[in-house]
Image (cartoon, rainbow, N blue to C red):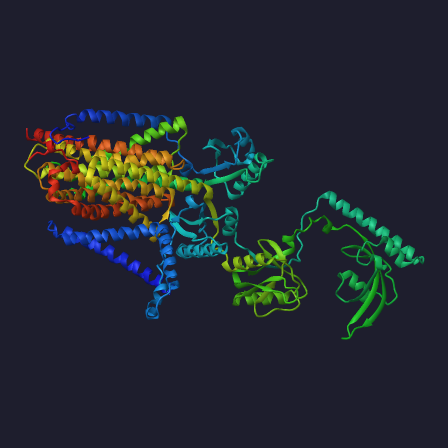
Amino acid sequence: MEYSNERQYNIIGYRKLWFFISGTLIAISVAVVALWGLKLGIDFTGGSLVEIEFKDNRPVVKDVESAVPEQLGKANIAPLGDRGMALRLRSLSEDEHQQLLASLKEKLGKDKDDDYLNESRFTSIGPTIGAELQQKAVWAIAIVLLAIILYIAWAFRKVSRPVPSWQYGVAAVMALFHDVFIPVGIFAALGHFMGVEIDTLFITALLTVLGFSVHDTIVVFDRIRENLLKPAEQFAIVVNKSVNETLARSINTSLATLLVLITTLIFGGETIRYFVLTLILGIIFGTYSSIFIASPLLVSANRWTQKRREAKER
Amino acid sequence: MLFVWKIILFVLQWIGWLVLTVWSIFLWLWQKLRGTFQTTRGRVRWALVSVIILALLSGLSVYPNYYNQLASAANGQISRLSDWPAPSYLNWLKPVSRLRLPEYPEKPFRLGLDLVGGTQLLYDADTSKIPLSDRVSALEGVRDVIERRVNAFGVAEPLVQTDKTGDQWRVLVELAGVKDVNEAIKQIGETPLLEFKEQNEAPTVSVLTDEQKKEIVESEKKAKKTAEDLLKRLNRGEDFAELAKTYSEDPGSKDAGGDLGWAKKGMFVPEFDRALFEELKVGERAKQPVRTQFGYHIIEKLEERQDDKGELEIQARHILIAAKSERDFQPPQNPEDQWKNTALSGKQLKRASVVFDEQTQQPQVSLEFNDEGSKLFEEITSRNVDKMVGIFLDKQPISLPKVQQAITGGRAVITGTFTVQEAKLLAQRLNAGALPVPINLVSQQTVGASLGEIAIQRSLRAGLYGFLLVAIFMILYYRLPGIIAVVALLMYAAFVLAIFKLWPVTLTLAGIAGFILSLGMAVDANILIFERLKEELRLGKSLPQAMQAGFERAWTSIRDSNVSSLITCVILSWFGTSVVKGFALTLAIGIVVSMFSAITVTRTFLRVIIRERQQSRLWLYGVRRKSILV
């Protein structure tokens, strides 16, 4: 596995191909979200989640359903793990919660041991809290994106030729949009087919991916910045050279991070499974975008300004 | 002796920590500032020693078990020294056998709710009735009261925070390891409402239906006739007492043959009073049945006398034929109507404590009022002499003492039928006071303890396997520097975990995920440096030169990329529920420490192992001879 210095991959030259691939993926993601929507979890919609562990032979879903008191509304019930059962209901008050537990104990654990069923987790979130969190999540993502543009513009303030420093920021953020859109699209599909919900942890994972992906992008930009100081070559060639020089690092870093994340996905348990999956998806697309999207975008921007300038001069 | 040693070592450990941290940072800064690489081997060695000691101390505080076992074994051996026969001129050495190696204090990680079980409660505070300027202090009051209530049922390190979202004030309560969440919620949310009430005398009135009015008229007629008939029978000479026993509808006097005993003026209803004290003579019977609110009375005045103070007392007997009146159709009075509120409540309470009755040893709750409360209590007791004053807790009467005389001094005792435990809890709750504003539970997250244990085991295993995979990858790909990176990573893990323990950072499941993720990111700094090192080697630089250039050129990348991740962490902790905050904090600590460990640890180790003669063995650094350009 040696990425030789003598051979350079022509990444910039094929940039329209990468743009096309990413554009298609983003289009599909947007379509999927528009078509099926995102399945929001109770963090955002309000509601309650009750997880019950049964000591042995778990009852069938139908029995559990009939044990839920009628006045608590419709319960969405699904098996969980080997011996568990997850009940999703509207937001419950503490009294209603106790009522539910009493009813479950009475109807399901009638002639069983006292500890036949145990509540392992209970979450109830009021609707206003959910709405607030939704708003906060959107704000958080917007602020992260803005902060990153500003930071990159500042960090690259000394490199203003041939591309102004704010364009580095914009290119990085466009790559970030790509990194956010595609996992969101994948989760919309997962939500549609497998009932996977979007919760606070998903947003956390997305924000982390933003951080990680821009981290990747900055390493490449940093190399471009360094190479631009050397005897002048064409911008596209400098960028291509820089991308190639940092290729091994980008791939290896992502690989190391993915190794830890994949072990966490396999051994880390139910509760953070989709959180880790989001991170994995985000890091794969983040690495892809910092190599194939962010830097080629810089070249495109440069070409575009050049053409406009030439048109003006004519 | 042992104790003193423990203190000394404890202090030394902290000084060591501080000095070494400052020293390493200083070294690192100094080298950065000097910019050029002109090391003497001595300086490198010093850096190496500090880094290793720092790592050992970190490792020790993360996992002190082995050291402590070793220490206690050694202590056993030392204490046996005194058994050895020693010549007397060696007596001055004796105290040596009393020396002990100190144990390293074991401090557990602080685990979050999702790992140890417990509950997180979010309350809306209703501040609508409080002026804007007082809201902050009202919320502080809420926090203090909740803190006191929570402390009453003994939870380790409870967290009570106020928070404002938009115009809405909230209170966040986290109780780790609490067993009975339902009970906890009750204790937090319910104000122990202590009220003092006096008896209500004004009856409530409701409008009668026509049917009921008719019934009253009929019953009136019937009663009047019965009474008149009885009077005729009496006048015919029938026995008063006999007739009273048979017909009287006054349960209080019926069985005594209608005898009411001695009574003073004013004790009976006005009509009855007038008949006895103004119209009748002793031994006389009223000519007509007397109508009162109860019905028709046949009254006989038996005797008359003066009491000690010269007041007139009369003995009389009567037969009551009850007639229905409006009163009978009023709804039965419920306890709340029987009692009316006074201005005195738990608000004017200064202190509550548990006392024991001197005779019965029954636990009681003693109350002490403030000045306002004392005054009110005096007023209430003085206008209710010989009447009952109700003490109500949460709308339930817990004690209904009869007032003997006005009470000054502002002290009262609740004698309920308490157990000692109940009395204590009540006193505690009363002392905690009332909430300045009402609160309302809007969100609850409860995790059972068993779930947490599984989660810890799983994430530890995941972390370990992840670490092993990364180690294998790094060594295979980067060879000698790879080994260094693995050692640096181990030290990195020790540093971070030690910080988690000593800070202490509350670890949640997401927090552990953040740490595991930061392992991957910590490797990144190493990868950046090594890739750069390889490049410089390919350009034909000598090993020390290549290393120097590698570090310097990689630094800007490491700095800029990590700053952007740190920005994200800051925003995450703002976005955060506590789960997200935990993740952001561990990730941020991880990023900062990884920058430190890559620059200090990796660099120091590389400097120590780099030798000129390795120039001919560049495969150690993963560089092929063929790929060298110059």
Nearest the eye: A45 or B108 = B108
Nearest the eye: B124 or B227 = B124
Could you tell me which quadrant the N terminus of chain B lies in? bottom left
Q: Specify the farthest residue to the right.
A: B236
> Where in the figure is residue A68, as x and y percent of width and height?
54, 34
Could you tell me which quadrant the C terminus of chain B lies in? top left
Residue A169 in view here: no
Vertical placement of residue B309 versus B240, above or below: below
Nearest the eye: A13 or A311 = A13
Which residue shows up at 76% across the image and 62% down it? B268
Residue A141, picture quadrant: top left
> Where in the figure is residue B583, as x and y percent of width and height?
34, 43
Which residue shows up at 32% across the image and 29% down it? A185
> Where in the figure is residue A88, as x and y percent of width and height?
47, 34
Vertical placement of residue B25 versus A175, above or below: below
Number of dots carrying numbers:
0
Horizontal relation, residue B295 to residue B120: left or right: right
Horizontal relation, residue B503 to residue B154: left or right: left
Nearest the eye: B171 or B324 = B171
Residue B404 in view here: yes
> Where in the figure is residue B557, as x and y percent of width and height?
18, 42
Vertical placement of residue A8 versus B273, above or below: above
